[in-house]
Image (spheres, helix red, strand yellow):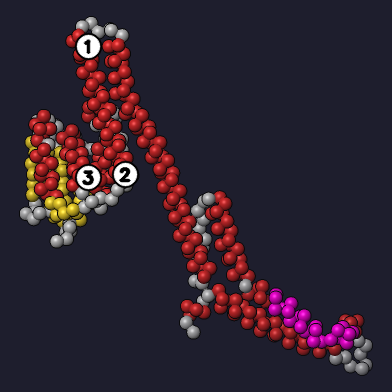
């Protein structure tokens, strides 16, 4: 018989049943021999009270009922002993399930057997791990929500306070002349533009990271796509007094599956970030490579180095490498987080590297099959 079917709870109870019968029978045989030897008394020997009582019981009740009763009792005792481990293991599993359902906390059960109880314990452990993962995700979601509210409140408060201050100054007719009033109106207008940009980025970040509708993918030449975006960024490069260098390490087209209208936002944010922080280096570099089945685009600037402690966090929302939350240098703090969210939705990856000479943002996408 296959060991797979023998090593089951059913067969464990069957073996316990058989062993209980055999053990009870052996015990009854031994007791029967002992009783017979104790009942035999020589005529010269006076019988003991024990022997007299035993003979009276056998004569008035009968040996068969006594053996049957002793057999049932011995069977139950041996069956309890042989199934004690199974029952205690079942009780342990039951207690673990009750703890998970009542307390709502993960609980791990030691897998001791390979039968149904072992499989049950293993499945409970898997369920416990999923429960723990769900609880961690719930805590992370709550923490992320609180951090999001805090970040939005902080970034909205600063320009809004400025706008209210300048408008109050104008509304109270405290301006000396029309030129001063226009000056304050212009500042208020710029602050409202900052607010609009922050709100747009916030909506975009929420849309990207909430999943949204499935992407409509099409074949896209990533090389030509990024080149076009770089050309569109020439006015911004001119304003920053920066030059752009394109290095093509492969003559082949880098075909990927992507949603162009989604991916354009990611690379616009990466290029804008490189321009914002690379002004001192006066140069933006974009390179294309084919590494195995990965289409690689590297966007580099030669500005100030990103600290090693900041690198793991730069793709987090509202995180800025500089300590001041200046809108003039730090943007909304959502651009890189939006870029990462879009690239992740395309099954791609983005990493950052920085040293004293240059800072690289490297994106990788699976190459589309012909």
Q: Which element type, helix, strand or loop, lies under badge 2?
A: helix
Q: Is residue 72 magenta?
A: yes
**x and y percent of residue 61 in the render?**
86, 84
| Circle 1/circle 2 CB separation < 8 Å | no
Q: Would you call the spot at circle 1 few (<14 residues within 10 Å), some (14-19), or many (20 or more)? A: some
**Which one is earlier in the sequence, the residue at label 3 or at label 2?**
2
Residue 18 vertical position relative to residue 363 in the rendered view, above or below: below
Residue 276 in view here: yes
Q: Look at the picture and state if 269 lies above or below 120.
A: above
Q: Is residue 132 left or right of residue 83?
A: left
Please report the bounds of the magenta region as a residue range. Answer: 55-77
Callout 3–callout 1 Cβ contact below 8 Å = no
Residue linked to disc 2: 209
The disc at residue 262 is 3
| Left or right, residue 151 beside residue 110 | left
175 or 367: nearer the viewer: 175
The quarter holding residue 78 reads: bottom right
Q: Quadrant of residue 309?
A: top left
| Residue 265 x, y percent position in the rendering | 21, 41
Give the CA distance from mark 1 to mark 2. Answer: 42 Å
> What residue is shown with label 1?
181
Disc 3 to disc 2, how far (Cα)?
Answer: 13 Å
Q: CA distance from mark 3 to mark 1?
A: 41 Å
Marks 3 and 1, the one that precedes in the sequence: 1
Tell me the SS state at disc 3: helix
- Mark 3 or 2: the one toward you: 3
Residue 154 is labelled as none
Residue 152 included in the magenta stretch of the image: no
Residue 282 visible in rendering: no
Residue shown at 63% from the left, 75% from the top:
82
Name which residue lies at 8% across and 44% down: 246
Badge 2 crowding class, 10 Å Cα cut-off, few under 14, some 14 to 19, many 20 or more, is some
């Amino acid at each position: 018989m296959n060991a797979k079917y023998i090593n089951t709870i059913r067969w464990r109870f069957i073996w316990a049943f058989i062993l209980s019968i055999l053990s009870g029978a052996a015990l009854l045989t031994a007791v029967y021999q002992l009783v017979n030897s104790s009942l035999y008394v020589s005529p010269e020997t006076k019988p003991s009270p024990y022997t007299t009582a035993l003979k009276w019981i056998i004569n008035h009740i009968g040996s068969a009922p006594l053996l049957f009763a002793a057999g049932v009792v011995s069977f139950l005792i041996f069956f309890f002993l042989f199934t004690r481990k199974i029952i205690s293991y079942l009780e342990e599993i039951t207690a673990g399930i009750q703890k998970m359902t009542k307390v709502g906390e993960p609980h791990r059960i030691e897998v001791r057997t390979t039968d149904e109880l072992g499989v049950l314990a293993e499945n409970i452990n898997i369920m416990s791990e999923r429960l723990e993962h769900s609880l961690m995700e719930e805590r992370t979601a709550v923490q992320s929500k609180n951090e999001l509210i805090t970040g939005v409140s902080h970034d909205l408060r600063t320009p809004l306070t400025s706008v209210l201050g300048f408008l109050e100054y104008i509304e109270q007719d405290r301006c000396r002349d029309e030129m001063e009033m226009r000056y304050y109106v212009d500042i208020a207008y710029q602050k409202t533009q900052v607010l609009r940009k922050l709100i747009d980025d916030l909506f975009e970040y929420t849309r990207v990271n909430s999943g949204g509708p499935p992407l409509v993918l099409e074949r896209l030449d990533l090389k030509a796509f990024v080149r076009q975006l770089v050309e569109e960024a020439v006015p911004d490069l001119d304003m920053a007094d920066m030059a752009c260098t394109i290095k093509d390490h492969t003559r082949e087209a880098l075909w990927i599956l992507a949603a162009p209208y989604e991916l354009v936002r990611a690379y616009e944010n990466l290029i804008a970030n490189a321009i914002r922080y690379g002004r001192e280096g006066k140069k933006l570099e974009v390179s294309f490579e084919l590494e195995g089945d990965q289409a690689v685009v590297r966007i580099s600037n030669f500005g100030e180095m990103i600290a090693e402690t900041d690198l793991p966090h730069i793709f987090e929302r509202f995180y800025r490498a500089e300590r001041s939350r200046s809108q003039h240098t730090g943007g909304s703090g959502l651009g890189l987080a939006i870029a990462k969210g879009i690239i992740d939705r395309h099954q791609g990856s983005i990493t950052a590297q920085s040293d004293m000479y240059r800072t690289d943002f490297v994106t990788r996408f699976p190459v589309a099959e012909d």
